[in-house]
Image (cartoon, rainbow, N blue to C red):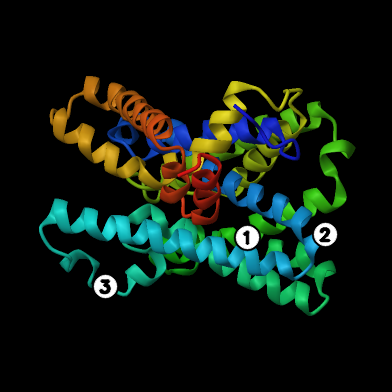
Amino acid sequence: MPIRSDRNAGIDVFRLLAALMVVVNHSRFTDEGPYLTLLGRWTVLFFFMVSGYYFQQAFHKQSMKAFAKTLKALVTLLLVANFFYLLFVGITDGSLHSLNTYFTLFVGTYFHLWFLTSLLMGYGLLWLFLVNDCERFLPLLAVGALLLTLGLNPYSYLVGLSPHPIYARSLLSIPFLCIGFLIAKLGLETRLSRWTAYGMVALGAGLQLGEAWLLSRNEPASLPYNFVDGTVLFAAGLFLVALQLPLIPTSPLSYYGQRYSLAFYLYHPAVNYLTSQLWPKDDKIACWLGPFLSVLLLFLVLLVLDRISPGSIQMLTGNFQRYALVRKYNGR
């Protein structure tokens, strides 16, 4: 199981953990443990920080060429994932009428693909700042985007507004791409101690639960699921913990995180749908065991695909260039 030596093993392990948490967050379990689900909202923010962290390293070496490569990879991934779920919606719903809305422009053809459209917008704004030599203003961009995001959701009620949550989600990549970029540029993982990172995680967890309790007094049915102020500290702390983990690059969990975490994120809704059809009962046992069944089933599918055709994993995650290299290496 070869691992690229320039990767951080801790990040890859946490990518796997984050992908598994996403499966849980999007399952029937959310009805049973809303506050535990809230503590799982660090996942997508972590992915954004990982993207910003590695992009800074690429930008340092390749300057603006890094944007071209990143844009090509992201657009390819957008097309692959949206085409898959276009077929999935057509098969499961029997029509595409549910996609006949302008929200499809923000989200894509399935609810979780907002991550990709947000990432595309975040990279566009990051490019605008870097190409105009405004890198010094990235901290202000991050703070401003965070305040705007929190103002749109969940604190919009303070000004009497109730915008759709997708508007806030679409902005989330901006601050966390910047945070990941700045952590890499400043080398904060070497300047801040591991205990500082642990403290950020603990304080962030407490703030999230406290905010959720206060906010639930206004909207008890939905607010425990929201991204809140404490999520920023919680997610950033976990990212620093991941960077400082003393793991070797050949760790099996690191390998699975590097190779399968993106596929887990992209295709878990299809597997969650399948398990809900196989186990239609909406009882407590199904709510608690459903996510584990989904994780196990998806993991087995990816392992089998990887065994039969290693390049298929790259194709599913939009990396056709690496798929071509795999075919060439195998003499196909």
**Mark number for residue 60?**
2
Secondary structure found at label 3: loop
Residue 97 percent coordinates (x, y): 16, 68
Instruction: Please tell me whether residue 175 is drawn above or below residue 298 in the rendered image.
Output: below
Identify which residue is drawn at 31% across, 36% down. Answer: 27
Quarter of the image that includes the N terminus = top right
**Mark number for residue 101?**
3
Identify which residue is drawn at 10% across, 58% down. Answer: 94
Foreground residue among 150 and 124 = 124
**Mark number for residue 306?**
none
Foreground residue among 308 and 57 = 308
Secondary structure found at label 1: helix
Q: Quadrant of residue 205?
A: top right
Residue 158 percent coordinates (x, y): 50, 63
Distance from Cα at disc 1 to Cα at disc 3: 27 Å
Q: Amino acid at mark 1?
A: Leu
Q: Is residue 332 left or right of residue 220?
A: right
Q: Amino acid at mark 3?
A: Thr
Instruction: Please tell me whether residue 217 is drawn above or below residue 116 in the rendered image.
Output: above
Disc 1 crowd, CA 10 A, few/some/many (<14, 14-19, 20+)? many
